[in-house]
Every structure is written in structure tokens, then in C-alpha cells.
């Protein structure tokens, strides 16, 4: 009786596996994600402020203007931008992160006291939800005014 029960369980298990696989219709429409590369538009910047593609020098109460260039593997105009500034060291007091803008280019006034910060631009493709980041060293000060 025990062997018959084991065979019955095995047959039921096999039938359920085959039924589960039959429901899989093989609909595999995989789409490549849009890979976005972010670089600084160094041709149209103040060379005293934007030193390199990854480093910006500003002082308190200075205006900051940064333009970026995007290259995409799949052309998309449905992009979201977010510029934030955050402190480089976790032991420094608040604010740990502050949003500066939501446009492709950044134009803001810097009012935080001198310290070591990171400027981050986040570009999100809204169709896929995938985000790409570019980090800048910002050894001056930072906060929108």
C-alpha cells in the first residue's frame, strides 16, 4: 500500500509539472535597456569652475552652471533629471543630501559653507525606470539659494 501511494504521488507530481510547463507559451520579449552615458559639456563652461569632467570648484555665494551631454544606446526623450549635492563624509552634520534641480542643465547659487561635497546628476529613463549617475567632486560649498 505504501508503494502504491508513493507512485500515485509521483504521478500527480509529474502531471502537475507538465501542466505548469504547458502554460508557458514561450513569450519572451526581452528588450535591451537604454544605456546612458553622462559627460560634462566642457566646451561651454567656465574653465575656472569646471576643472575636469569630474571636478568642479566653487565658493560660497558663487553661481554654478553645469551642462551635460548624453549618449544613449536607444534614443529616448522621456528622461528625468535630478541634481543633488551630498556630503562626502558621513560624520559631517546635516544636510546629508539636498536636491538642487530637476532640469538637464544645472543653474544654481551655492550658499552652503565650504566643505567637501559631491555633486550628483541622476538621469532616469522613464520608460524602463533605469537610472544612471555621474558624480562630481565639489570641494567648495553647495546648496541652492
Image (cartoon, rainbow, N blue to C red):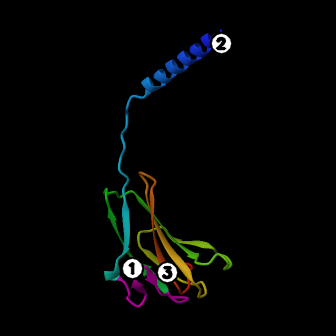
Taking the magenta stretch, the answer to whether it contains residue 57 is yes
Horizontal and vertical percent position of residue 60: 55, 89
Label 2, label 3: how far apart the Cα atoms are: 71 Å
Q: Which mark is residue 131?
A: none
Q: Position of residue 114 (x, y in %)?
A: 59, 88
Element class at badge 1: loop
Image location (x, y in percent) of residue 80:
44, 61
Q: Does the CB distance between marks 2 and 3 fall below 8 Å?
A: no
Q: Residue at x 48, y 25 (%)?
A: 20
Q: Is residue 20 magenta?
A: no
For residue 101, above or below residue 6? below
Mark 3 residue crowding within 10 angstroms, few (<14) / some (14–19) / many (20+)? some
Give the residue at mark 3.
137
Magenta-colored segment: predominant secondary structure: loop
Residues drawn in magenta: 45-62
Q: Is residue 31 above or below residue 9?
A: below
In the displayed structure, 138 sits above or below 21; it is below
Q: Position of residue 65 (x, y in %)?
A: 43, 80
Horizontal placement of 30 versus 99: left or right? left
Q: Residue tagged by mark 1?
A: 53
Image quadrant for the C terminus?
bottom right
Measured Cα–Cα span from mark 3 to mark 1: 10 Å
Residue that mark 2 sits on: 2
Q: Secondary structure at mark 2?
A: helix
Front tag of 2 and 3: 2
The residue that appears at 41% across and 69% down in the rendered structure is 104
Of labels 2 and 1, earlier in sequence is 2
- Please, what secondary structure does the residue beneath circle 3 have? strand
* Residues under numbered marks 3 and 1 in contact, where contact means CB atoms less than 8 Å apart: no
Identified at 60% across, 10% down, the residue is: 4
Residues under labels 2 and 1: Cα distance? Answer: 73 Å
Q: Are marks 2 and 1 in contact (CB under 8 Å)?
A: no
Amino acid at each position: 500500500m505504501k508503494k502504491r501511494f508513493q507512485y500515485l504521488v509521483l504521478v500527480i507530481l509529474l502531471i502537475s509539472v507538465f501542466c505548469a510547463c504547458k502554460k508557458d507559451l514561450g513569450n519572451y520579449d526581452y528588450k535591451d535597456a537604454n544605456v546612458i552615458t553622462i559627460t560634462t559639456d566642457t566646451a561651454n563652461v567656465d574653465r575656472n569652475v569646471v576643472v575636469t569632467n569630474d571636478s568642479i570648484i566653487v565658493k560660497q555665494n558663487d553661481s554654478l552652471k553645469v551642462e551635460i551631454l548624453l549618449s544613449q544606446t536607444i534614443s529616448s526623450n522621456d528622461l528625468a533629471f535630478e541634481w543633488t549635492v551630498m556630503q562626502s563624509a558621513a560624520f559631517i552634520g546635516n544636510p546629508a543630501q539636498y536636491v538642487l534641480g530637476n532640469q538637464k542643465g544645472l543653474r544654481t547659487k551655492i550658499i552652503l559653507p565650504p566643505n567637501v561635497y559631491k555633486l550628483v546628476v541622476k538621469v532616469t529613463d522613464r520608460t524602463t525606470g533605469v537610472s544612471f549617475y555621474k558624480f562630481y567632486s565639489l570641494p567648495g560649498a553647495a546648496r541652492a539659494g
